[in-house]
Amino acid sequence: MHVRRMRAGLKGWGGVGAMAIVCALALAFALLLPWTQSPGGAAGAGGRGLAEAGQAADAACKDPEKQTLAPSAADGPTISAIKARQGEKRKLVVGVDQNSYRWGYRDPNNSGAALEGFDIDLVRRIAQDILGDPDAVQFKAIPTNQRIPAIQEGRVDMVVRTMTISCARIKDVAFSAPYFRTGQQVLAPKSSTVTGYDASLARKRICTAAGSTANTKLTDDRRAGRLAASADISTTVPNQLDCLVRLQLGEVDAVVTDGALAASQAAQDPTVELKGGPFTAEYYGVAMKKDADDLVRRVNQILERYRADGWQASYDKWLSATLGANAATSTPPAPTQYLRTG
């Protein structure tokens, strides 16, 4: 199994050395993007404001993955505006990742280095349903800490970027029903003494992406005494892949992120591995504007069909090599309730 994962991780990347170069370039590019330094990123840097906001939202929120609208095929103002776009602009504008291996990434060995991955398959399915063309998409690479601002400011119609549905986030954006199940995990070098999300993280430098649920979880847990006070969680980055680069450079001792992403990062670098099991239960959703009710309903209708016809094939193609052939732990639950009414 380890050999299989290693081969899967190295295929298409030209070996670990080539991957390190790609990661370093990705880090440099991300740090040069001026909009990664916008005010939206500051809140995700582990500050007190984000943690307190998350705690307040959690107190008044239950089952965030169910806080969405019932499916519908009806066009409303949001979908009508998308369909009214003319010429080359008649596309669905979607915020995605271009650096998450097997989720949303560019394989330099493929012709044109087109975006591909599990999230990209879902985007194309949505575009096919709304605009009748799976290629009618304008992809916009969005850093982790810019996902919500990009939606609120109208830079994208939606974000499909391994984005966890959370109580704090549903105050700012609307989510679809879940399309993937995961949980937070620890990634560290195989030689590390870190054993998981436990006391072994004491005096360790831990990297998270700014604005991520991992960053909020660590901040809250350290304040509540569930994480060693000596754990250094000050290292935050705009994009999750940047944490792997910091780990490779020896600037941090561990990374905390969604297990699904961590497994893909371990496939890219066989010197690191997942430590311990998931310590949270989370669900990815498609994020949209709060008032885009018709678009939320349409995406939920698409997801109902996609879970039955498309999801498993995409998982087998992109994720089985890193997460295992059995998709049971990743399959999203079929919604039994759509609790949001307006």
Image (spheres, grey):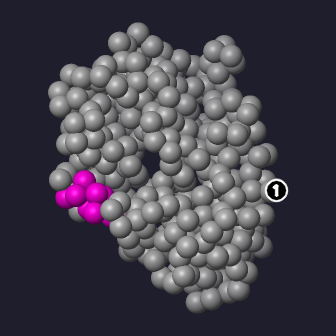
* Magenta range: 49-57
Foreground: 266 or 245?
Answer: 266
Taking the magenta stretch, the answer to whether it contains residue 53 is yes
- Counting the numbered discs, the total is 1
Q: Which residue is mark 1?
A: 309
* Residue 14 picture location, percent across and down: 60, 23
Q: Is residue 115 visible?
A: no
Taking the spot 20% from the left edge, 42% from the top edge, the residue there is 223
Taking the spot 73% from the left edge, 81% from the top edge, the residue there is 73
Left or right of 245 in this view: 89:
right
Principal secondary structure, stretch drawn in magenta: helix
Taking the spot 49% from the left edge, 54% from the top edge, the residue there is 163
Taking the spot 64% from the left edge, 76% from the top edge, the residue there is 70
Left or right of 11 in this view: 265:
left
Number of other residues with Cα within 10 Å of mark 1, as a class: few under 14, some 14 to 19, many 20 or more: few
* Residue 47 picture location, percent across and down: 19, 51
Residue 244 location, quadrant? top left
Taking the magenta stretch, the answer to whether it contains residue 273 is no
